[in-house]
Image: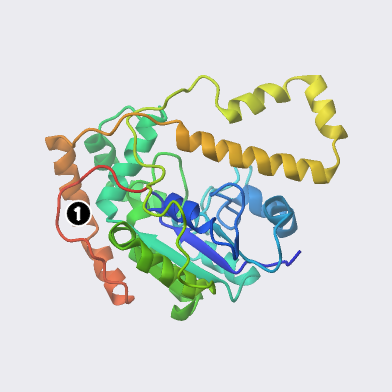
Amino acid sequence: MKPTLDFLVIGAAKSGTSSLFEYLRHHPEVALPPDKEAPYFSNDIVYARGWQDYFSANFATADPALRWGTITPQYMFGTVFVRAATQVTKGDGYDERTVPQRIRELLPSVRLVAILRDPVERAWSDYHMYVMQGRETRSFAEVIDELLRPAVLERCRRQYEIGERHVTCGEYGRILAGYRDIFPAEQLLVMFTADLESAPHGVLDRLYEFIGLTPGFVPPNLGRRYNVGAAAARTSRLTPNQAVRATRRIGAARALWKAIPDAGHKRALAMFARFDYRFTMWNRRGAVGPPSASDLSAGERLREHYEADASLLRSLGYPPPWAQKEVVAGGHA
């Protein structure tokens, strides 16, 4: 087993990473983990377990002749998920350079890929994902007003909290500046969701060439959109993770798991990760409705917030294609 990864798709969340995962996993020269989101560098809990533990869990059966990589949008959250039992104040010392620095230490030659969506549309999609999951009951306008407060913005840039990433995860210029401080420009490819939707063949060929794959391959599912925003979950009664938690409380099940060899654990966990990912893709129904007047007003405030960040993105050499426009629903996630 080779101890390295060839490429990382780092995000952004709700910008087409699920679609990229579904397209790229069909390429005959690529090995991906069974689950799209397999964070290491952005999660203090996973990071503390060590690279070998992560690597064996996600690439135990991968062919070393292939190009290995992950598609993990958490790498563009701009900070890390902090272990609850950390000895320092939660978030201290973490910023948009923390994850790139961790990556550089282990994977100095890795190829990095970012895909960016209009940040207002991204925030709208992100918000509705939390509504669908039952984690958010406030209106979009109420959430945005809260997250645009200066003190909240500063806190969200230092530490990750569930439900508070809608605004700061769209500050692409700030986040990618952290990567450019650590990696040379030639190791970072920046693409845009709008191009993936309008010209998917060209986008994929750019990606193939950048990460060292044979160009021209057309995945059989090209053009299908994955993880599209939905109004509600099909079911919340018994998800795969809930079933696992329930099983862990059964003594006989715990004893049986301990009796299985480590190799069997890895295969079982890989199969579960794939099933859980597929369940998540299925567990959505109904389309998100059109934005209200207050939603559109919140989108305008967001658009103003992102103006300075768009200028920073242009200065890095990645001019964003989005112009002044209203919040819209739908698209890739």
Using residue 178 as the reference point, say whether residue 297 is left or right of it.
left
Q: Residue furthest left?
A: 293
Q: How is the image coloured?
A: rainbow
Q: Considering only vertical position in the picture, is 16 above or below 111?
A: above
Q: Position of residue 263 (x, y in %)?
A: 81, 46
User: Where is residue 121 drawn, in percent x and y?
Assistant: 26, 49
Residue name at image x 80 percent, y 20 percent: 251
Q: Amino acid at mark 1?
A: Arg
Q: Residues within 10 Å of mark 1 (few under 14, many from 20)?
A: many
Q: Is residue 324 left or right of residue 200?
A: left
State whether residue 98 appears in this view. Answer: no
Q: Is residue 66 above or below residue 153?
A: below
Q: Find residue 71 and report its horizontal and vertical position in percent.
A: 52, 56
Q: Secondary structure at mark 1?
A: helix
Residue where numbered disc 1 is placed: 303
Query: At 80% across and 27% down in the image, what residue appears?
Result: 254
Q: Nearer the viewer, residue 265 or 75?
A: 265
Which quadrant of the figure has residue 176?
bottom left
Question: How many tags in the picture?
Answer: 1
* Quadrant for the N terminus in the image: bottom right
> Residue 250, how many percent across, how many down?
76, 19
